Image (cartoon, helix red, strand yellow):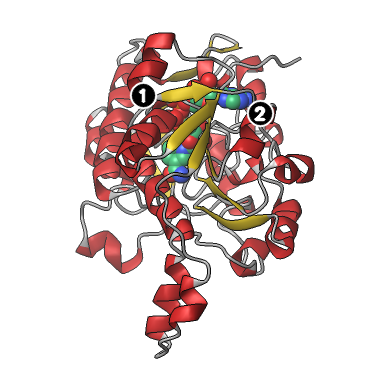
Amino acid sequence: MKVVWIAYPGGAAAKQVPELLGCAENALGLREFVAAKGHELVSTSETGPALEPLLAEATVVIATPFWPAYITRERLAKMPNVRLLLTAGVGSDHFDLAAAAERGLTVAEVTGSNVVSVAEHVVLQILALVRNFVPGYQEVVSGGWDIAKVAARSHDLEGMTVGIVGMGRIGQRVAERLRPFDVKVLYYDNRRLSTVEEGVLEVRYRSLDALLPACDVVSINAPLTPATDRLFNAARLAKMKRGAYLVNTARGRIVDTAALVEALQSGQLAGYAGDVWYPQPAPKDHPWRTMPHHAMTPHVSGTTLEAQARYAAGIRDCLERFFDGQPLDRDYLIVEKGKVVSPSYSYAFG
Ligand code: NAI
């Protein structure tokens, strides 16, 4: 069987940092394991048309959200051998899940593998925005000392209201990590937590319409599905409190590209941060690179070296079970036997 691994190029770091398992060259540290099982692992950073001859031969495709190969319905139609689609990480929207289900394929991701990594990044980016960190840093490296310029947009997080949209594994960890900052936390999710869970996390449920105008900071932590695609459009951004901050480490397409730029230019939003873009890699002229008051990174929050070790181990577990004809870990399954089975991705398709 041919296993195709598509990931970002590691360059010089691939050799210098062997723990950089998630790059194309280091292939999750699984090259020898796959060969020992009698199969072939091919790695590439190609995501465009040059990838297609490899896809045509693949039985297993392993993709990563950080350098996504968009496996569309059209591409799947040209992949006669494919049986298993795996995400090295969390978030499988780069696969057309409805088309995969119709084909009877299995789709899985390494649930939980990088949720702490992302939650830490969310807290980092909330603080970066509220404290106006990036302009302060730029002042230092540019040789300046303009205190007024930086301080005029710098606030304490303490006392603010933070809204979490998508209270799953990451959302809950963000809520836990925000506790010592003495903020009030509201959340919206299409599956409400139990009263006990809400009590333990010290969070209160609101509808999305009620949450948006009540929050100084909103963090998006829901998957990209048909229901969340451009959920934060011009109308929803307008419902947010004027001068609020928005952090999105979920998926770029949950926020409307042009509407966000407009909201930052008009002052409707005071700042935006996150690490997810659409498309990825973001083109050099992507408007979010140059919009005002942002503190964005490339898509790195879920790929710390520790996260890479965890999702590499999860992919190894999936491959081992697949090669041995065993069912995959239930927690990892997104699509199975013609259905989207993950509750987090639960949506109907025709
Ligand atoms: P999870 O599955 O534990 O939680 C997702 C939550 O979103 C669930 O509680 C679900 O009910 C909720 N949800 C689903 N549809 C919704 C909707 N329409 N409205 C409101 N809530 C909705 O997933 P986890 O691990 O917390 O990850 C969340 C997302 O974060 C992933 O799907 C992925 O897109 C993104 N992610 C980003 C990473 C990065 O490196 N930036 C790394 C890992 C995940």
Q: What residue is disc 1 on?
A: 201
Q: Which of disc 2 and disc 1 is earlier in sequence?
A: 1
The residue that appears at 47% across and 52% down in the rendered structure is: 299
Element type where label 1 sits in the image: helix
Q: Quadrant of residue 118?
A: top left
- Respond yes or no on whether mark 1 lies under 8 Å from ligand 1: no
The residue that appears at 61% across and 22% down in the rendered structure is: 100
Marks 1 and 2, how far apart at CA = 20 Å
Q: What residue is disc 2 on?
A: 210
Quadrant for the C terminus, please.
top right
Look at the picture and state if 339 lies above or below 36: above
Residue 11 image offset from top left, x and y in percent? 35, 65
Look at the picture and state if 208 lies above or below 51: above
The residue that appears at 33% across and 25% down in the rendered structure is: 319
Element type where label 2 sits in the image: helix
Residue 36 image offset from top left, x and y in percent? 22, 32
